[in-house]
């Protein structure tokens, strides 16, 4: 099956990376690498089997920011840049991300993904799960063709992704702090793969082991900051701008940072928190009830505190890069750490 090349800048660089498009030295390297990764991604997802081919390419062709492969490419530029190994690792990072989306949508019964019906809505749960498994298998095969370091990073990331989902599913254990439990879940489910993407770019780009480790720390903190910001944006975003009804997580009963902080405040005797929590725990099927619950949470100081915590993780990401020499790539990575929090959706 033939796939046309994608204009990399048509993928639109996410906030924090825009200046790279104007860099006369870096822009061509990034553009070429992104285009190659996109072609290799679609090729890796293709199959002679019609069902496997269509279902595997479904979410990739629906779009996406490609943040993880972009990070792999960018961190490689701290060394020798995006050669074949870097591009292959970038493809693998996006394949793992795609596979988790197939699985997550089944577990969450999500009806829509990237503006289209979720895969399980099209083919059913079994095909969606097996498609995710197939993509993970192909990602493992691709990584095994590189080196032991990459395979080990990938294996550890697989383990953390599964453990994060498992712990989210069963909830905090008896006596476990819900806040600590939640942070570990998002570090495993979101932070681990962003960390792997950043680390492998440095590794295959020829950076030192010390630099690769710094990039790993940076990536995990960025991933956590991103998810924490998502929790707040779910409450504070404008429906027209984000395309998502504010309070969707509240309605679905998803534990998020503001609600966890609200529960802790209510347990400590905060009357306003208890009143807001009563709305959150009520029947939110009605839009007016949902809007009232959202307004109550947003009006409480826990929402500002949630923003502060997200920014703390963004700063933690930036601090991980302190020892790196100044460069355009370092500046872009620092800007991205800020941008994952300072966004509208």
Image: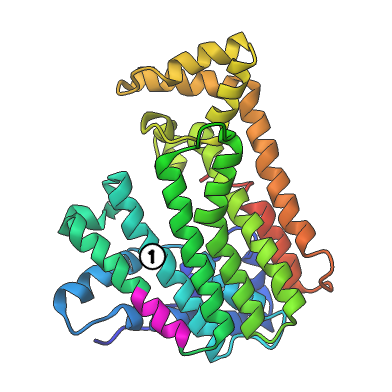
Residue 295: x, y in percent?
A: 51, 20
Label 1 sits on a secondary structure element that is helix
Report the magenta residues as a range: 137-144
Residue 202: x, y in percent?
A: 66, 78
* Depicted 98 relative to depicted 189: above or below: below
Residue 49: x, y in percent?
A: 16, 80
The answer to whether residue 229 is visible is: no
Instruction: Please state, as top left, top right, bottom left or bottom right, where the N terminus lies in the image.
Output: bottom left
**Residue sitting at x 79%, y 58%:** 319
The answer to whether residue 78 is visible is: yes
Give the image's coloring scheme.
Answer: rainbow
Left or right: 319 in relation to 68: right
Left or right: 141 in relation to 317: left
Residue located farthest toward the front when viewing the structure as drawn: 174
Question: How many labels, in total?
Answer: 1
* Residue 138 colored in magenta in the image: yes
* Depicted 206 relative to depicted 217: above or below: below
Pick the residue in front: 207 or 185.
185
Q: Which residue is mark 1?
A: 98
Residue 304: x, y in percent?
A: 66, 30
What type of secondary structure mainly makes up the magenta span? helix
* Residue 24: quarter of image: bottom right
């Amino acid at each position: 099956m033939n796939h046309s090349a994608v204009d990399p800048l048509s993928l639109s660089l996410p906030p924090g990376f825009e200046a790279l498009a104007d860099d006369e030295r870096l822009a061509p390297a990034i553009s070429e690498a992104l285009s190659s990764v996109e072609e290799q991604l679609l090729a890796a997802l293709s199959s002679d089997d019609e069902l496997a081919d269509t279902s595997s390419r479904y979410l990739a062709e629906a779009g996406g920011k490609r943040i993880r492969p972009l990070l792999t490419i960018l961190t490689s530029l701290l060394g020798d840049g995006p050669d074949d190994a870097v591009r292959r690792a970038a493809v693998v990072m996006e394949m793992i991300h795609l596979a988790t989306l197939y699985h997550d949508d089944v577990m969450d019964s999500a009806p829509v993904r990237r503006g289209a019906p979720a895969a399980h809505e099209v083919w059913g749960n079994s095909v969606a799960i097996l498609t995710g498994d197939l993509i993970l298998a192909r990602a493992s095969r691709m990584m095994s063709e590189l080196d032991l370091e990459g395979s080990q990073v990938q294996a550890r990331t697989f383990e953390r992704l599964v453990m994060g989902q498992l712990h989210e599913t069963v909830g905090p254990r008896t006596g476990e702090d819900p806040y600590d439990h939640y942070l570990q879940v998002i570090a495993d489910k979101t932070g681990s793969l962003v960390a792997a993407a950043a680390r492998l770019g440095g590794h295959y780009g020829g950076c030192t082991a010390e630099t690769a480790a710094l990039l790993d720390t940076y990536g995990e903190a960025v991933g956590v900051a991103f998810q924490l910001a998502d929790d707040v944006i779910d409450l504070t975003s404008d429906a027209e701008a984000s395309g998502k009804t504010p309070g969707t997580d509240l309605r679905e009963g998803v534990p998020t940072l503001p609600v966890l902080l609200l529960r802790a405040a209510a347990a400590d005797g905060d009357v306003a928190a208890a009143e807001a929590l009563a709305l959150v725990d009520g029947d939110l099927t009605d839009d007016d009830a949902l809007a009232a619950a959202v307004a109550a949470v947003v009006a409480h100081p826990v929402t500002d505190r949630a923003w502060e915590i997200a920014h703390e993780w963004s700063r933690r990401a930036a601090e991980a890069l302190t020892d790196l020499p100044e460069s355009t790539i370092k500046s872009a990575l620092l800007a991205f750490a800020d941008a994952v929090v300072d966004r509208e959706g």
